[in-house]
Amino acid sequence: MRSLDESVQRLDELASRLNQATDKLNDQIEAVEQRLSATRIGLEVWLGDDRIPADPLRESETDFFTVGWTKLGEGWRLAARKTEFSEFSGDWNTLDPQPLTNAPRHVRMQALPLVLNIVERLGNEAERWLRDVEHAINGSPAMPPAPELPLAEDDIPF
């Protein structure tokens, strides 16, 4: 069995290595944020189907994080937001998003592979918005108008 001093020294070394690895994780997240910010896309997306458990030791349908791309303060960021179900009130509560780099470590770890999904979703949203804006510029509605129904005699106001 290790002595207390040996255990604390081991813990100190492990904590240092863990913090260095976490810094690298944050560096990767920040590098993606810089690339996405440079696009100036200005669209928000969330991956509602890709849930990350709030507790890394158990799956939960009532306490989880989702990740996305959103405006936080003055800039656009990869973000995480927590959703909780209150058994007392029976309500779902989605908390304010926070920068992904500030989310719990396990959320950042599980979110990194989901970044491609965020970028793909942003691309899909950009296509949709581009189509709608181009239709607006050209004077045609983005959605075809509803067909006009023939009026019944009772509907004629005179």
Image (tube, helix red, strand yellow):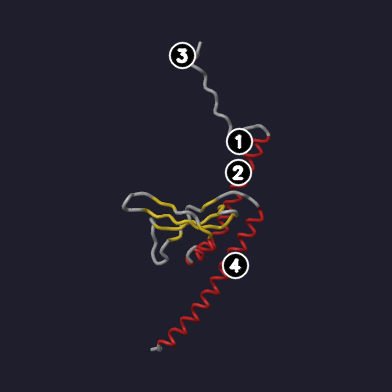
Which amino acid type is shown beneath numbered disc 3? Asp
Q: Earlier in the sequence, mark 3 or mark 4?
A: 4
Residue visible at 59% across and 66% down in the picture: 28
Foreground residue among 64 and 89: 89
Kindly report which numbered mark, 1 or 4, lies closer to the viewer in this rendering: 4
Q: Tag on residue 27?
A: 4
Q: Earlier in the sequence, mark 2 or mark 1?
A: 2
**Mark 2 packing: few (<14 Cα in 10 Å), some, or many (20+)?**
few
Residue visible at 67% across and 36% down in the picture: 137
Which amino acid type is shown beneath numbered disc 1? Ala
Question: Residue 6, image x and y in percent?
Answer: 44, 87
Q: CA distance from mark 2 to mark 1?
A: 10 Å
Q: Tag on residue 43?
A: none
Residue on which disc 2 sits: 128
Vertical relation: 53 (above or below) 155 = below
**Mark 4 packing: few (<14 Cα in 10 Å), some, or many (20+)?**
few
Q: Earlier in the sequence, mark 3 or mark 1?
A: 1
Q: CA distance from mark 3 to mark 2?
A: 41 Å
Residue on which disc 1 sits: 142
